[in-house]
């Protein structure tokens, strides 16, 4: 019978990684330490920005380290520590697109419409 690869979850609650192990205890590449796989995050605070003709800024929770954005319209966006201003030279996200990011403490996000108003939805992500 062929064994199955299993996920081994560390007992340390602060750990954010799991190891992929074969039935004999080795990782899939044959080593003894396993392969670190980033654990998917859970949902934290939801936020949104009404995207319009002027840049609008929103602060994430100070301890947030990951977030996801979803745009209903073509949007320019800026991400950084402290207040941000989105311009036509900022990053772009298309309508119906979702992007996930790691971030530093005290991150803020700004958004600006490309041609028409809409919403930029923001989901803060927390360790699972």
Image: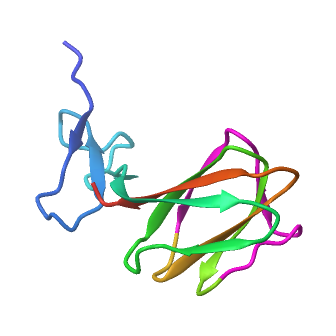
Residue 111 falls in image quadrant: bottom right
Q: Reply above or below: 28 against 113.
A: above
Instruction: Identify the residue at the far bottom of this view.
Output: 82
**Number of numbered labels in the structure image:** 0
User: x, y (%) of residue 42?
Assistant: 32, 52
Does 90 lie within the magenta span? yes
Residue at figure coordinates x 50%, y 79% from the top left: 104
Q: Going 67% across and 38% down the picture, which residue do you hit?
A: 96
Residue farthest to the left? Answer: 11
Q: Is residue 91 above or below residue 63?
A: above
* Residue at point 18%, 36% (across, down): 24
Query: Is residue 30 in the magenta section?
Result: no
Image: magenta residue range: 84-102
| Left or right: where 112 falls relative to 20 | right
Look at the image and tell me in which quarter the C terminus lies: bottom left
Q: What percent of the width, then of the height, locates residue 36?
A: 36, 54
Q: In the rendered view, how is the structure colored?
A: rainbow
């Amino acid at each position: 019978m062929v064994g199955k690869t299993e996920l081994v979850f560390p007992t340390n609650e602060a750990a954010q990684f799991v190891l992929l192990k074969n039935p004999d205890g080795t990782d899939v590449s044959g080593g003894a330490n396993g392969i670190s796989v980033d654990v998917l995050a859970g949902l934290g605070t939801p936020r949104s920005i009404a995207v319009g003709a002027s840049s609008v800024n929103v602060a994430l929770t100070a301890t947030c380290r990951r977030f996801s954005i979803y745009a209903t319209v073509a949007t320019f966006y800026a991400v950084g520590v402290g207040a941000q201003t989105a311009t036509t030279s900022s990053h772009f996200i298309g309508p119906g697109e979702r992007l996930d990011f790691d971030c530093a403490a005290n991150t803020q996000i700004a958004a600006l419409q490309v041609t028409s108003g809409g919403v930029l939805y923001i989901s803060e992500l927390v360790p699972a």
